[in-house]
Image (tube, helix red, strand yellow):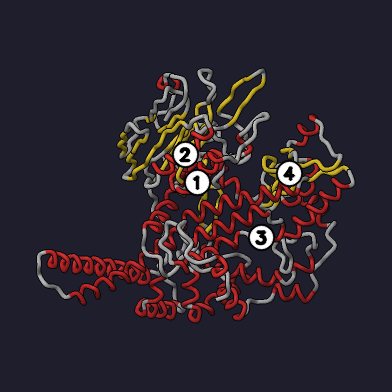
Amino acid sequence: MATGEHSIDIDDEYSTLDDDEEVIVEGASSYTESLVCSDVELNTDCKINDSGKEKCLVNDTLVNFVSLYAPNVVSDRGNFFDFVIDYTKDLDNLIIGGDFNTSLSVLDRGSKSCHMNDEPYRKLTKLMDDNNLYDIWRARNPDCRIFSWKRISEGKLQQSRIDYFLVSRNMSSFVQSLYYNVTSMSDHSFVIMNLNCTCIERGPGLWVLNNTLLFNEEYVQRVKDIISQEKESELFHRDFLILSSDLAKQNKREYYKLERQINNLCEKAASGIVIDIAKLESLKLELSNFEIIKCKGAVLRAKAIWAVESDKNTKYFLNLDKYKQESNAIKELLNKNGDTVSDTEGILELQHSFFSDLYSCVTTDENKMSDLLNYVTKTVNEDDNTMCNDDVTEDELCKAINQLSKNKSPGSDGLTVEFYCKFYSELKYVLLKLFDAIEEEGILSRSMKCGIISLVYKKKGERNFWKNYRPISLLQVDYKILERIMSNRLKSVLPKIISEDQTCCVIGRDISNNISNVRDIMELVERDDLQGYFLKLDQANAFDREFDLYSKATGAKINRQNSEILCLGTGTLSVVEKDHIGLKVCEDYFQLLEVFIGKNRKMCDEMNWKNKIVKIKSLLNIWLLRRLTIHGRVSVINSLMLSRFWYALFVTALPEWAYIEIKRLCLNFIWKNRCHLVKYNCIVDDK
């Protein structure tokens, strides 16, 4: 899509595009629009109408592209955004691109121009909230400053980022990359977005136990018999898996049988034949029970945060399940040479190479390790040492299993926490014997050493860069049980040997204390005009000099790219010192433990709450898609939304404007953005 003030030949400008790219180009042209697509093998059908909207059917999904050019006059721009809000209110899967003539944050303004929180800005944010849209470039580049419009006026450079794409969140997984290209033909830059809508080749997958089988009496008895028999011999799973498969097929047959019976009765009624209404209602009730089970499966696969009894098997859950599967798919990666790899074998090879290096054993220096340990003065007493090395007891085993979280993805064997809870009486002695054998032999079983690595996109940076994915290891539940037993033992010992300055993972300590300590130190240095430096380190890659001893002794590495330094008081760094340190130098503030901290506390508090409120707006707009009762919406407010504020309230002050905005969001969500039927004082009163 292209909008602007000058005509150009887009075909010539982008004649070098790769054959496997589908690209939307946003830049300068004479009020024209064009979708630049390569000849890819997709079920794609594009149609453009005169109103500036393009409908594109991609793999049976209707995608709506809207190209716009917002007026320069503020009043006209506000009216224009009102029109766009009304124009897009019934559209799903939206991609809106154009010259919005409105910046979205202070980072989008350069020189002496200021970001304006004016009427057009507020209406544009309403457009984004109503359609669950977001500025995808800013989301992937939260700290970068790039400007799409530049003009020299009276000898001074004016610049801002007012050209961008707003994308529906459920479409974000298709956006492979997004970047700006400067052109001499206009004072606007091109905004180039690469879309990849190819279907991913599915692998063999992993078997995962269907927990609903644990409520089937025949299945439970068969498993108990197998466990009882196999305690005396080699354990096989064949009967176990066959029964699971047979039950699934039987449920499908019964579901389709009910559907046919309901359809037959409805056809008879349409033909004028008198039918038994009570029988029809009974069949619908039976079908509803199957749909509830299907809905629960979609909720589990989609990893939905919240589900209440009034939720049905609606578009929300099914779309969320599909979106999760799509967002986890990796369609292409860049290799070390910067070349794009899109075939399945090539992607797997790149991943294997990277994670083999990441998880390989690191070399440590024994001498450096001894030097480091010489500084450690605290030791574990004899009683604690004996407790940590004792055999696992039945009470510890029971406690550990009950502490494990339910409805979580299992490891390679597919057995869930619920399975171990259901068959605890049959499995407890097997597990105790297993843990004793591990202690005697000093090695884990082969299956316990196996993990499934699942890659999760960090939602920052380009999707084709492997460093922007976070690996999550899915481990077997028997391993997690042993880990939880050891963890419970260590919890009682760690407070005795770990310094009080370290608050993470120690019972009775609050991580928010660290933020308060850092803030107090910064204010002291600034107030007394002392010389100080704050260094925030991120552990990852190799570092040098200052951390030479620690790195060689432990194998730990520091990530320079994500580490920062802030000068306090009279502290300064010369250009040479900055180059030598090689870290990002912060001017006024930095982010510590998800909280902005800096020299100006008021400014940091504003930033903290503004970011949280923006995220909450998007979250509530998603929940509005679900058909919740008023009690369900109140539960979402109390348990899901407000819980996201507790941590911030511990460490930051709540500005008056933030309190008013949070109150407004809560009330509008409860009443679904309609008229408030009950006074506020009645809502917050005791039951």
| Quadrant hosting residue 205 | bottom left
Q: Amino acid at mark 1?
A: Lys
For residue 135, say whether it is visible: yes
Between discs 3 and 4, the one toward the N terminus? 4
Q: Are marks 4 and 1 in contact (CB under 8 Å)?
A: no
Taking depth in this image into account, of 584 and 96 the one nearest to the observer is 96
Mark 2 lies on residue: 81
The CA distance from mark 2 to mark 3 is 36 Å
- Helix, strand or loop at label 1? It is helix
User: Residue 647: which numbered mark, if any?
Assistant: 3
Lower position in the chain sequence, tag 1 or tag 2: 2
Q: Earlier in the sequence, mark 2 or mark 3?
A: 2
User: Against 57, is 289 above or below?
Assistant: below
Q: Which residue is mark 4?
A: 589
Q: Which image quarter holds the C terminus?
A: bottom right
What distance separates the C-alpha of mark 1 from that of mark 2?
A: 9 Å
- Residue 504 percent coordinates (x, y): 71, 61
The quarter in which the N terminus is drawn is: top left
Which residue does the numbered mark 1 point to in the structure image?
126
